[in-house]
Image (cartoon, rainbow, N blue to C red):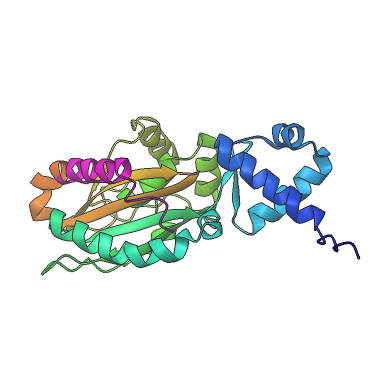
């Protein structure tokens, strides 16, 4: 008797082919994916919508990139998720400041984790972080990584509002600020989210996932804000070169 051939699910194979193409090239449009995979455009769109819905891909600026769920396919999430608290603890001790890790997930700013420094508790969240991204360094870092039209869409849902006298006054002023940021540069804010607190953050984009690491300081230590932000950037760059810090969400 001839051996039985395995049952192959065509849609699964086609979806995986699209994921492999995106992983190889970084970002691709639906039309290019259709051509490269040899699939009808309608079929490609159907598969891409499913992959985006489940978090394996992101659709930004007309192209598809790997999404926050992609690391699970390689078993990375379990390994890295266990490493994140320890990594942040060490970082908080190095910076002598509470530190935070945040991501842009499903078009929302999400603070995944925060770790206090020894003897330095983080300030209480008094206004929801996801609704006030324009006012804190983590949110500004994440929104700066988006295209201008994506920033506008976010601010249409989460409008700019004055939390303190130092908060950016309106959407146009905020858009100008983001446009003036250098790619990959640290972001700092001084009492824009909370009086008595200054913050800094550094953006990270790996595999199309937008994330950021930030810290907070009491306003009476504002003189070390810029220096601490630069130290954080240098620390992240060393870790990325050593492949010790990748997509952690």
- Name the residue located 50 percent from the left edge and 35 percent from the top edge: 148
Q: Decide: is 220 above or below 238.
A: below
Residue 72 in view, yes or no: yes
Question: Per the image, is 28 magenta?
Answer: no
Query: Image check: 37 left or right of 195?
Result: right
Query: Image check: 124 left or right of 21?
Result: left
Expressed as whole percent of the image width and height from the top left, the position of residue 104 reads 47, 52
- Chief secondary structure of the magenta span? helix
Nearest the camera: 118 or 78? 78
- The span picked out in magenta is 228-249
Task: Count up the numbered dots.
Answer: 0
Query: Image check: 73 left or right of 206?
Result: right
Expressed as whole percent of the image width and height from the top left, the position of residue 175 reads 42, 36
- Name the residue located 78 percent from the left edge and 49 percent from the top edge: 46
Query: Image check: 41 left or right of 156?
Result: right
Residue with the most extreme front position = 1
Expressed as whole percent of the image width and height from the top left, the position of residue 96 reads 12, 58
- Name the residue located 63 percent from the left edge and 35 percent from the top edge: 28
Q: Quadrant of residue 118?
A: bottom left
Question: Per the image, is 230 magenta?
Answer: yes
Instruction: Specify the quadrant that holds the C terminus.
Output: bottom left
Expressed as whole percent of the image width and height from the top left, the position of residue 211 reads 40, 50
Residue with the most extreme right position = 1
Residue 128 in view, yes or no: no
- Name the residue located 40 percent from the left edge and 31 percent from the top edge: 179
């Amino acid at each position: 008797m001839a051996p039985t051939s395995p049952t192959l699910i065509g849609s699964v194979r086609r979806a995986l082919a699209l994921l492999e193409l995106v992983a190889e090239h970084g970002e691709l449009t639906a039309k290019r994916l259709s051509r490269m995979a040899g699939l009808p455009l309608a079929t490609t769109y159907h598969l891409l919508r499913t992959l985006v819905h489940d978090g394996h891909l992101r659709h930004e600026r007309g192209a598809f990139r790997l999404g926050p769920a992609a690391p699970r396919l390689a078993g990375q999430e379990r390994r890295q998720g266990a490493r994140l608290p320890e990594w942040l603890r060490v970082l908080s001790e190095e910076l002598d400041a509470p530190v935070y890790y945040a991501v842009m997930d499903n078009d929302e700013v999400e603070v995944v984790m925060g770790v206090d420094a020894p003897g330095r508790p983080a300030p209480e969240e008094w206004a929801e972080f996801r609704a006030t991204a324009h006012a804190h360094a983590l949110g500004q870092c994440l929104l700066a990584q988006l295209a201008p039209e994506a920033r506008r869409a976010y601010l249409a849902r989460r409008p700019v509002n004055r939390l303190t006298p130092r908060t950016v006054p309106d959407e146009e002023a905020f858009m100008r600020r983001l446009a003036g940021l250098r790619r990959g540069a640290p972001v700092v804010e001084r009492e824009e989210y909370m009086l008595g607190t200054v913050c800094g953050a550094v953006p990270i984009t790996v595999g199309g996932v937008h994330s950021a690491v930030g810290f907070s300081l009491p306003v009476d230590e504002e003189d070390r804000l810029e220096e601490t932000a630069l130290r954080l950037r240098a620390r992240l760059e060393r870790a990325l070169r050593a492949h010790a810090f990748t997509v952690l969400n």
